[in-house]
Image (cartoon, rainbow, N blue to C red):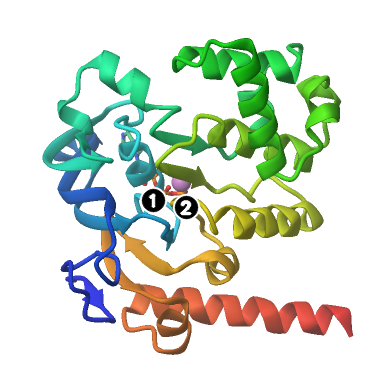
Amino acid sequence: MTETTNTTKPTGAGGPAGATQLVVDVSQLTVELGDPDRGHGVRIGPVDLRIGRGECVCVVGTSGAGKSTIGQALLGMLGPGGRVTGGSVRVAGTSLFEADDKTLRSLRGSTVTMIFQDPTSALNPVRRLDKIFADVLKAHGTTGKDEIVARTREALTAAELDPDAAMRRYAHELSGGMRQRVMVALALVNRPAVIVADEPTTALDPTTQKEVIELFGVLKRTNTLVVITHDLRVARRLADRIVVMSLGRIVETGTVEEIMTAPRHPVTQGLVANQKLTKVVKRRDRS
Ligand SMILES: Nc1ncnc2c1ncn2[C@@H]1O[C@H](COP(=O)(O)OP(=O)(O)OP(=O)(O)O)[C@@H](O)[C@H]1O
Ligand code: NI
């Protein structure tokens, strides 16, 4: 099925509303994972996605729809067995799949950063946090001691952590929610043009999930965000625009209101109906 766009957008299908500066420009991207011709692989795309500065786009869809693949493509990488077969991904003006390794390495973690699903495995447990932040800053050219401390403080504060206390801690001492905050701070520290978060709440307990969603609500005020989630509640809370994926393609885009009140594509309708059902069940559990 072709894409159903709920609103007329001046920049064309998959674009932000209004004359905003483009930060992400995915154009006719096609990807192969594995070997689809031999029956053990999938084709993703063609995908068009344009994101303006300051926008928060939430990518939703059922499992295996290709959400994480698009998220990875925004960092110019793909999972094992993945390759780009057509189209382009431009982030802050650089065409990622045409860029050389050195350009990509310097771009990742500075221009575009990723907040991963599982904060436990991504943080070295036995290195002090101030050292971890210094490593990330130095890797992208910030070398002055004072500047490193100032940038670390700025990022920790933005992630709503107490910088003095946090800098002296080790990752293994932190609760799940605090670790996720540290991951957010690490993603912010090089002042990226766009932050991609793949299922940032999935590995967390319900209370911490709420906290992290609140935190993303704060982040979205000053950052360009792409949040990948199978949880429509997360998208409802955060998105300026929801992008729905199914079977490797974007099947619908719209504002939260458009998607929630008038979903057009059967997959979107299914997601919305499911979310409403979850709400009813939860209410019943409480009474
Ligand atoms: N190397 C590979 N070979 C074959 N199939 C692959 C390979 N890598 C990924 N896939 C398949 O490609 C599809 C898209 O994966 P992707 O992780 O992008 O989906 P997703 O929407 O993020 O799903 P989830 O919600 O489960 O995280 C999945 O069905 C996955 O099993
Ligand atoms: Ni995924």
Q: CA distance from mark 2 to mark 1?
A: 6 Å
Residue at 54% of width from left, 34% of height from top? 187
Q: Which mark is residue 175?
A: none
C-beta proximity under 8 Å, tags 2 and 1: yes
Residue under label 2 = 228
> Percent position (x, y) of residue 27?
15, 50
Q: Is residue 189 left or right of residue 20?
A: right
Q: Quadrant of ligand 1?
A: top left
> Percent position (x, y) of residue 44?
23, 48
Q: Does dot 2 land on a helix, a strand or a loop?
A: strand
**Res 255 → quadrant:** bottom left
Closer to the camera: disc 2 or disc 1? 2
Q: Does dot 1 land on a helix, a strand or a loop?
A: helix
Which one is in front, 113 or 251? 113
Binning the other alpha carbons within 10 Å of mark 1 as few (below 14), some (14 to 19) or many (20 upward) gives many
Is label 2's Cβ within 8 Å of ligand 2?
Answer: yes
Residue under label 1 = 67
> Percent position (x, y) of residue 109?
45, 27
Is label 1's Cβ within 8 Å of ligand 1?
Answer: yes
- Evaluate whether residue 116 shows in this view: yes
- Give amino acid for label 1: Lys
> Percent position (x, y) of residue 25?
22, 49
Residue at 30% of width from left, 22% of height from top? 104
Q: Is residue 253 left or right of residue 205?
A: left
- Give amino acid for label 2: Ile
